[in-house]
Amino acid sequence: MYEFYAPTKVLFGDGCLAEASPRLKEMRATNVLIVSGRSKTASLQGFRELCIGLDASGIRYVHFGEVSADPDTSLVDKGTEVYRAQHCDAIIGFGGGSPIDCAKGIAASVAEGRSIRDFVGTGLVFTKPVPPLIAIPTTAGTGTEVTNAAVFTVVDESGRRSKKGTSSQFYFPKLAIVDPVLHLSMPPSLTAATGMDALTHAIEAYVSRFNTPISDMYCLESIRLIGRSLRSACHISEGAKAMQSRRDMALSATLAGVALSEAGLGMVHGFAHAVGALAGIPHGLANAIILPFVMQSLIPDAKGRLSDIGQALTAKDNISPEESVRAICQLGHDIGIPENLEAAGVSPSYFEDILSDALSYRRRKASPRAFTDEELRELLERAFHGAPQQ
Ligand SMILES: [Fe+2]
């Protein structure tokens, strides 16, 4: 028996950002909190268009534009205060994964009437429906526009940072507006890192112990689109091919988001969250570096599934698990992903803290291999200094 639940309505297509205001009107929203990152540089034009549309529709809005990468819980509290003080009745998360996750946290805090901190890493569950939540991604990676998950940074009394995932059926946005035009101005390094985040979602959900025939379908199509278009999305910035690559990547990220809500993630994310929180490496980049190392370690336990992944990624038949890992490495190499964590500038002094965070990763049980603690230590050693195929 399995369940499939993907309740977010998805609007997809060039220029569909223009639908934001009419859809908000349908939801009877009158005063919207827009949550975004500080710079919005990758999507400034889109942000202006959103505001112009709201003005023209007579919908008031308040802009909370303070979200930095990997928002900590105090930032969510701050946004929640703004929502309450301004008497908002709907929330838009506009940007990459960080502002959209922050919007989810604000929505949940408003509904529950308490700080998001009370829910992060504590086991306390969300019980109340949130205000109308709309996600407008400007990167193609996290898939958070359709997921039941949000990740926050927790800072403990000693100042140590860790990233903790939370999930809730109430986190599914009511509407995701996925407009590939918004992704056109992403710089290649951001396209590469976020695209590899989407690939990691699709691969980890596909090999997950909790995969289902429905999540598999989303994963394989996502991987196929990434194999077809991530390189060109990184290397071509103008013309019809650039636009088609953006469409493929936008769709791949959304499909992988649906899959990860169903099937979960694995130890690539277990390590990447720790690397991101402690060493400040962007989430997608951390995943991209660690992905082939974890897949190499999974070969004995997930041979058939790794072959499927390689076939979807390369559009070739009869790919062995080893060739699949090579194809993932080659893709990373072609788009400028460093070979290991050391090459990415992660200090070895973080090793023990990264390992200790990864050992307590809440989704560790989704891994198709029940890694021992010692195996994870060896895996992290290789990811720091080695090459996946050694
Ligand atoms: Fe991710």
Image (tube, grey):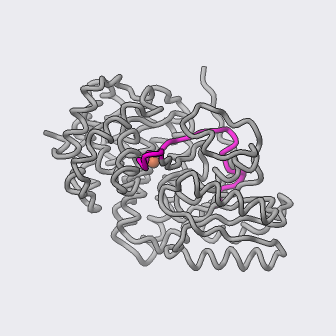
Q: Is residue 307 above or below residue 341?
A: above
**Side (left or right) of 19 relative to 387:** right
In the picture, the quarter occupied by the N terminus is top right
Which residue corresponds to the image point at 21% horizontal and 48% vertical from the top-left?
A: 348
Q: Position of residue 328 (x, y in %)?
A: 29, 47
**Side (left or right) of 318 relative to 202:** left
Q: Which one is nearer the viewer's eye here, 335 or 244?
A: 335
In the picture, the quarter occupied by the C terminus is top left
**Side (left or right) of 139 relative to 334:** right
Which residue corresponds to the image point at 77% horizontal and 59% vertical from the top-left?
A: 84
The question of residue 218 being in magenta is answered with no
Give the residue at the far front of this rendering. 158
Q: Is residue 41 above or below residue 101?
A: below
Which residue corresponds to the image point at 74% horizontal and 35% vertical from the top-left?
A: 127
Q: Which one is nearer the viewer's eye here, 382 or 206?
A: 382
Does the rendering let one see residue 295? Answer: yes
Give the residue at the far top of this rendering. 1
Q: Position of residue 317 (x, y in %)?
A: 30, 40
Q: Quadrant of residue 162?
A: top left
Does the rendering let one see residue 222? Answer: no
Q: Position of residue 18 (x, y in %)?
A: 70, 71
The question of residue 175 being in magenta is answered with yes
Q: Position of residue 257 (x, y in %)?
A: 54, 46
Q: Which one is nearer the viewer's eye here, 217 or 329?
A: 329
Residues rendered magenta in the picture = 156-177
Which residue corresponds to the image point at 23% horizontal and 47% vertical from the top-left?
A: 349
